[in-house]
Image (cartoon, grey):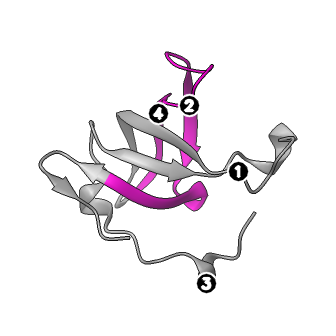
Amino acid sequence: MRDKRDKPAISYKQLTVGAVIVYLVRPEHNPKHPEKEWKGKVIQVNRSAPDIASVEVEILEEGFEGLTELVYTAQIIRIVYTEGNEAPE
């Protein structure tokens, strides 16, 4: 997994249902291509006071449409879309 210092700061206020995120698959899932960036649409936000611990996403990648996955905040590379706004890249 990438070093957190390589990631731009994420505004977790933008991490809401409907947001589209780019993330990496967890190493314990033994991804074939660990640096592949996946896109998913947030369908649920799981909070662990006071922060967001994880999100449930609907995978948007071809061949995986309609599947869901739990994504922890440490896996998120960037937020590419939120309702009404493009997130800065």
In front: mark 4 or mark 2?
A: 2
Label 2–label 3 contact, CB within 8 A? no
Q: CA distance from mark 4 to mark 2?
A: 15 Å
Local crowd size for mark 3, using a 10 Å CA cut-off: few (<14), some (14–19), many (≥20): few
Looking at the image, tell me whether mark 4 or mark 2 is earlier in sequence order: 4
Q: Nearer the viewer, residue 21 or 55?
A: 21
In front: mark 3 or mark 1?
A: 1
Can you identify the residue that label 4 sits on? 56
> Residue at point 47% right, 37% down?
40
Q: CA distance from mark 4 to mark 1?
A: 19 Å
Q: CA distance from mark 4 to mark 3?
A: 24 Å
Give the amino acid at mark 4: Glu
Q: CA distance from mark 2 to mark 1?
A: 11 Å
Label 4–label 2 contact, CB within 8 A? no
Depicted 10 relative to depicted 45: above or below: below
Please identify the residue farthest to the front as the structure is shown. Answer: 62
Give the amino acid at mark 3: Arg
> Residue at point 61% right, 84% down?
5
Looking at the image, tell me whether mark 4 or mark 1 is earlier in sequence order: 1
Q: Is residue 78 left or right of residue 12?
A: right
Give the amino acid at mark 1: Lys
| Mark carried by residue 36 | 1
| Mark carried by residue 61 | 2
Give the amino acid at mark 2: Glu
Please identify the residue farthest to the left as the structure is shown. Answer: 84
Looking at the image, tell me whether mark 2 or mark 1 is earlier in sequence order: 1
Local crowd size for mark 4, using a 10 Å CA cut-off: few (<14), some (14–19), many (≥20): some
Can you identify the residue that label 3 sits on? 5
